[in-house]
Amino acid sequence: MIEELERKLDSFDGGQRRAALLELSKKVAAGQVDLPEPGTDVNIHCHTFFSYNTYGYSPSKFAWLARERGLAVAGVVDFDVLDALEEFLYACRLLGLKGLAGLESRVFVPEFADKVINSPGEPGISYHMGVGFPSATVPSDQQGFLASLRETAQGRNQDLMARVNEHLRPVELDYERDVLVLTPSGNATERHMCLAFARKAMEVLGDPDKAAGFWSEKLGVELTACQMPESRDLLDAIRARTMKRGGVGYVKPDQGSFPRMADTNSFILASGGIPVHTWLDGTSDGEQQIERLLDVAMSTGAAAINVIPDRNYTPGSSDVKLDNLYHVVEVAERRHLPVVMGTEMNSPGQKFVDDFQSEELKALAPVFLKGAHIVYAHSVLQRESGLGYTGEWAAKSFGSVADKNDFFEELGGSLQPGKEDDLSGLSDDVTAREILDKIRA
């Protein structure tokens, strides 16, 4: 029964997901399912099936699994949309999980137009995030910007698909019939197209050996029948050889391909979120100038930094990427930037949560927990009273960013999901101490 309910959490039918979640919560209340006390592990950068989750997780499924694993804080981030937000926050409240939601996109950074930042092979282009949005319904004057993120991404996808179709004939996709059906709200990504191409090859060729021969020829790599129909190796090869730099469908983006970082930060701030600069691994020309890069990002509103620890070390061995990870965290701490982190789960093999007890990460675990508590507290205060981390109330209430971080960390650590409503309707003359006293009453 539990496994069947968990399976229904990933249904594309929102009503079925909600019904399954409610049934699971009833079983918890009845003592039929035991959930652990929250620990100290966090993952606040997980994609859902509203962009692409390699395991097919819905917002409700991720919330359930995060609660089942005892995460201290969990967060979802989807490409170009806030479609997961309301469902995820509802699930978190129902399950007693500290949660937040945001989005990820790509932006153009004029000051680094001649340098690769964190989008490999693409000078001036940077992955970028906003976290802690209070609602999926953004202010009316920001709705056009949000809609344009989705529309532009889908247009790029269809142009890319047409170029790849020409190369892969007779394996060709119909965007609506083969790609959009793989995601519940029409927000397909490159990874959806890779999966669609892999499945279409089996549909057209009908045999794993023939499919392996087809892909080996078209992609220029040796693939075998056992890697059919949709192994990680095959999906990675399709993406690398047809959609990324050097691939047959790739077209180099320019400054008109994505919104400017400054404009994206303005949208995030106006919508109640926290703009977040994202960091890859410190090896690019741009990231080797991390201080200047952060100066640029922060000048237009970036107030946190994102890292993906798992891609920056090999367990048991020290290398330059691990050194870079420690360096960028040191820089973030010195600049009082909360560190947002997670595992993404938008590619096969990625973990549900990092191993914070590993030799590589255990010294950084308190920094990650602190960042998660800060952005969780922002999410709640902004949603309930409009008194978030980046707003006027915070600007006038604290003498320094360090003081502001201390307050939001304490609030995020102390506040329980069932008490979030206690922060509703606060006036903008409330003090930080009064807020903390209120949740402890």
Image (cartoon, grey):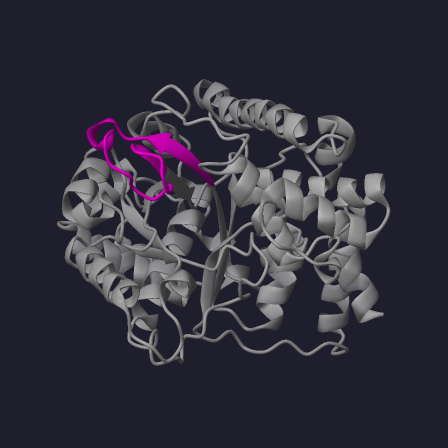
* Quarter where residue 245 is shown: top left
Magenta residue check for 117: yes
Q: Position of residue 108 (x, y in %)?
A: 33, 29
- Report the residue at 35% width, 35% height from top: 122
- The mark tally for this picture is 0
Image: magenta residue range: 104-126
The reply to whether residue 137 is in sight is yes
Looking at the rendered image, the quarter that the C terminus falls into is bottom left
Magenta residue check for 120: yes
- Report the residue at 39% width, 67% height from top: 414
User: In the image, 8: left or right of 147?
Assistant: right
The reply to whether residue 437 is in sight is no
* Quarter where residue 64 is shown: bottom right
Question: Is 154 situated above or below 201?
Answer: above
Looking at the rendered image, the quarter that the N terminus falls into is bottom right
Q: Position of residue 338 (x, y in %)?
A: 29, 55
In front here: 56 or 40? 56
User: In the image, 203: left or right of 324?
Assistant: right
- Report the residue at 79% width, 48% height from top: 210
Q: Position of residue 39 (x, y in %)?
A: 47, 76
In front here: 434 or 286? 286
* Quarter where residue 117 is shown: top left
Question: Is 320 situated above or below 432?
Answer: below
